[in-house]
Amino acid sequence: MDNIQTTLAKDKLLALFAREEEAITAFSTPLVNRIRQHALSRFRQNGFPATSKESWRFTDLTPLLNTEFTFDFSNQSRSMDIEKIFTCDVYDLDTFSITLLNGWFVYKNAPLTKLDNGTIIGSLAKAMELYPELVDQYFGKTAKTEEHEMAALNGAFVQDGLFIHVPDGVCMEKPVQLINIVDAQQPVFLQPRHLIIAGKNACLTLVHCDHSLTHNVSFTNTVAEIFAEENAVIDHYKIQNKGRNSALVTNTYFHQKRSSKVTSNIITLNGGFTKNIVDVTLAEPDTISEHYGLYLADSNQHVDNQLYIDHLAQNCHSNQLFKGILDDEAKAVFSGKVMVRPQAQKTRAYQNNRNILLTDDAKVNTQPHLEIYADDVKCSHGATVGQLDPEAMFYLRSRGLCERTARQMMMIAFASEVVQKISIEPLRDRIHDLVEKRLKGELSICDQCVLHCNSKEPTTFNIDLSKL
Amino acid sequence: MENNSDKILEEVTGSDYKYGFYTDIEMDQAPKGLSEDTVRFISAKKNEPEFMLEFRLKAFRHWQTLGEPDWAHVNYPPIDYQDIIYYSAPKKKATYESMDEVDPELLETFEKLGIPLEEQKMLAGVAVDAVMDSVSVGSTFKKTLAEQGIIFCSFSEALQKHPELIKKYMGTVVPYTDNFFAALNSAVFSDGSFAYIPKGVKCPLELSTYFRINAANTGQFERTLIVAEEGSYVSYMEGCTAPIRDENQLHAAIVEIIAHKDAEVKYSTVQNWWPGDKEGKGGVYNFVTKRGICEGDRSKISWTQVETGSAITWKYPSLVLKGDYSSGEFYSVAVTNNYQQADTGTKMIHLGRNTKSTIISKGISAGHSNNSYRGLVKATRRAENARNFSQCDSLLLGDQCGAHTFPYLDVGNRSTIVEHEATTSKISEDQLFYCLQRGIDMEGAIGLIVNGYAKEVLSKLPMEFAVEAQKLLSISLEGSVG
Amino acid sequence: MLSIKNLSAAINGKTILKGLNLEVKEGEVHAIMGPNGSGKSTLASVIAGRETFEVTEGEVTYLGSNLLDMPAETRAREGIFMGFQYPVEIPGVSIANFMRTAINEKRKYLGLEPMTGAEFLKLMEEKKKMVDIQSKLTNRSVNEGFSGGEKKKNEIFQMALLEPKLSILDETDSGLDIDALKVVANGINLLRRKDNATVVITHYQRLLDFIIPDFVHVLFDGRIIRSGGKELAIELEEKGYDWVKKEK
Ligand SMILES: Nc1ncnc2c1ncn2[C@@H]1O[C@H](COP(=O)(O)OP(=O)(O)O)[C@@H](O)[C@H]1O
Ligand SMILES: [Mg+2]
């Protein structure tokens, strides 16, 4: 059930939609607009997720919806000189870089590029104009608007975002880097939408950074639909480093066909409020799906990772490893569900969530769930909440390390199990650096993600080691 | 233990429910349906003190405001609470001084069940308080117990003789507001057991109660209350079997345990009510609220359960670890076959400092059944240095069944360590073949492997129970291999 | 006793045994040797009745009946014993309980009265000595936490208890130090009688210093490519398997 605040927010959004419908729907294909109507009616019916719903029990959106948000239904930032605002600082990482500013595509030349190898990269709005069949073939096919309120909301307001289509047999050697920047003087509400398709035998690496440039209030609600066709390989990295006044809800859907492989890695370094929903459909046999996550939170940050892996076919392998370190009054939620359907024999599924609490005010709720209807399976899961292993601490100290160094070393080691899973070396090194800085209290929001910003007032987030 | 288990395994024969018969004793029962009048009828019938009636009425009024819980992983047709008889008692006198006075037909029933009520007195040293359809009909060894100041009697008797104790403790661990079934039980409970162990007393006997549902359409609503005073110890066993009946029978019991400073309570259950037939018809609905509180420092409570029966089980024996250094344990084996559904587990609520809990759960699913572990481990901010270890494994014996694990871990302080581990796998082909190669048939092989798998839990049961439990595991899996 | 004719067997569609012939008579000891992957364990599994292997051709007669018609447990009760190359662990099931169940199942099958606990304990004590097992082994779960050597000793111990007519011992010698090997070999020799037979599968001739075989066969690529007496084993040791492969 909605409470008054969320109902108010819902009514405002519905009224807004009615007012702005023309602008909102202007650049979409007829099919996308039909899907939009469906999503809208879902949102009208279900509203915002309430804490009475199991998956939102510990994550309450209500306080965030009090703000008077502004909305932007046309692209104000199309030809901004983005380099004036920031530059990429992963020096060794040669990427195909794309920027969204306040949810809109920023481009200097063309909004949509077709590379020599046939890959199409660019604005979703533009793709709907130039490649409507391609968009229609995939759009809305895997996002669960029935079940996920925030995906329904996004579906109702969808306008722009990233579109990638890697054709059959093409391997994108260069990683694609998507930089999602929020830079606004007033509180903004953004809903970018991404559609990413890797064709048969195709491969793609996507680095997705969520980043805020100011300390203003913002609410970002993204949906990404990611399709791995037969034998495709997708590496997906999300690096979240946002200001403490920002709220971020991501709904990421992976749809995997036969023998495809998806690796996803979500690194949450900073953020006021973060909820990541990852929903994976293993539709055909022999797929591999690996999901890693690391969250480092302090002050009163809130990080919620919700994973759902649906094994629908035989001989698929899924793995989840999420680790977190929580300081101050930070709160983390992990809910992972593995569903093994009756036909999904020979499933192997593993799930693991490990947490370290540094204070008595930090909190963790973890729910690793298995629901299994096939018998020839090997599934296991585990969850732990605890501190740094005192024996290991002692071992380090007995070798002459001071307590502080030993702790740092142990925390970095704890985190690096996840970082090690990053397969692009320069990115891994960079993330490792960031994590290390973060854990040493040396990371500011302006020295982060894979970016560098020119803001003059850096804010630092400290993990206070004396509390360990 | 070894020899017993051997004997048991040999004895396992026949695949029909062994305990399928029912005793025809004339019932003195309440009219069908539930209203304030029913509640008053029950209370009057039992000649209860005023406070009890008040309690029941409050619970009843609260129950009317509640809806049935729907979050468990079980499905069943709606229950018509007006189509249930809420009170029935054997017609003969309700309490007996000696066994001679007990209805011979009832004794015969127990004999058929293989419960050696007579023998147990001599052989096992077990005092038996047998509850048949809600009213206690026999208590043994009362004298031995009384000498030590131990009270072990039916709940009704306790209400007459020790109303102050009941008033002090009843509803303190499971308030009637706790949940739908707890409210229902609090309004209409018919009888149950009460045990009180005074300060410093180690109860010399295993206290034991056999419950048995016996009348058609009669929900059974027992209530058990165990109070262990400072430094005392008691081991309590609850076991039950039910005859085959066609309609579903509702069972909504409450068990409350209070352990004071340095006290220890062990509570063991073997639950073997009728699970329904192979097509999923009939069977008992077992919606139970069991909870203990480790009130005092260094107190300890352990739950051990072997669940093989009932069509639907909804049961989470829980512990509130309030005293510093208190500890709790939960050991469970749950077997489901055919169309059984079990949603069971525990809650460990750590409130005190340096509290410790252990959870070992072994689920075994066969046929078309669904078996879920659901557990909560919570450590509040105050519960410094709390420790929990949970191991919840599931074994699958067929491709039509489901095994689910739903742990919830909430930690709110930095010095707590909580660990949960679980695995789900199919029964190993290699193990089965190894047994077959030694000449053991498939059914025997499964029985052996499953008993081995559950051993960690079975070994926590008192001897008398361990034997029955092993037998039950094998029996309940009969016909599970195709 | 055992007669295998033109036996072919496959697993997951892959043919492993390709027309194998073998004749074992009462009182004989046969040794089957061959390089890794040649199908030795497969042969043992097929004789024991493991259903994951599919017999695609040929026949196997055991004491005059069609062995392939019998389920695994019937074969065991009829006196076939397989010593596993990799004995599986069965947690929580004690060896005593396991063996007593096995013996009594067999007795039931043969129409005999079950053995009482006391009789069984006595029998167990007796056989334990034979394979030099310390008493504690019998209280432990089947193979759980056993070292490689203990597992193999335990196989022979079970063989002693079950008194099979035909034993197929799959690499019972591998992973044993010389003392353990002597114990195992001694056990096998003690159990040797005129009316039973033993097939030892090994790829070292070392074991054959202790257990003198009547026949030695070389299994290669799913077929027996050469048979001979004890001297064949020695020749193999000297010249390696390439020698027989070439000769073929
Ligand atoms: N379960 C199985 N699935 C597929 N192939 C198998 C399986 N078991 C054995 N094999 C194959 O069968 C062949 C023979 O194996 P095995 O009988 O174990 O050989 P040996 O005992 O002589 O070393 C090998 O090539 C092995 O890879
Ligand atoms: Mg082998």
Image (spheres, coloured by chain):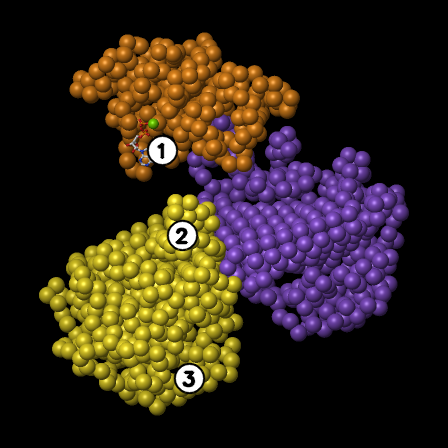
The image quarter in which residue A89 lies: bottom left
Residue A88 at x, y = what percent?
Answer: 21, 69
Which chain is painted in orange?
Answer: C
| Secondary structure under the numbered disc 2 in the rendered image | loop
* Chain under callout 1: C
The amino acid sitting under disc 1 is Phe
Q: Chain coloured yellow: which letter?
A: A
Q: Is the residue at mark 2 from the same chain as the one at mark 3?
A: yes
The chain under label 2 reads: A
Residue behind mark 2: A402
Q: For disc 2, does the CB lie below 8 Å from ligand 1?
A: no
> Which residue lies under the disc numbered 1?
C53
Judge from the rendering whether residue A244 lies leftward or rightward of residue B269; answer left or right.
Answer: left
- Judge depth for marks 1 and 2 and give the one in front: 2
Pick whichever, C69 or A40, lies toward us: A40
Which chain is painted in purple? B
What residue would you read off at disc 3? A67
Query: Which residue: 39% across, 27% down?
Result: C85
The image quarter containing residue B8 is top right
Q: Nearer the viewer, mark 2 or mark 3?
A: 2
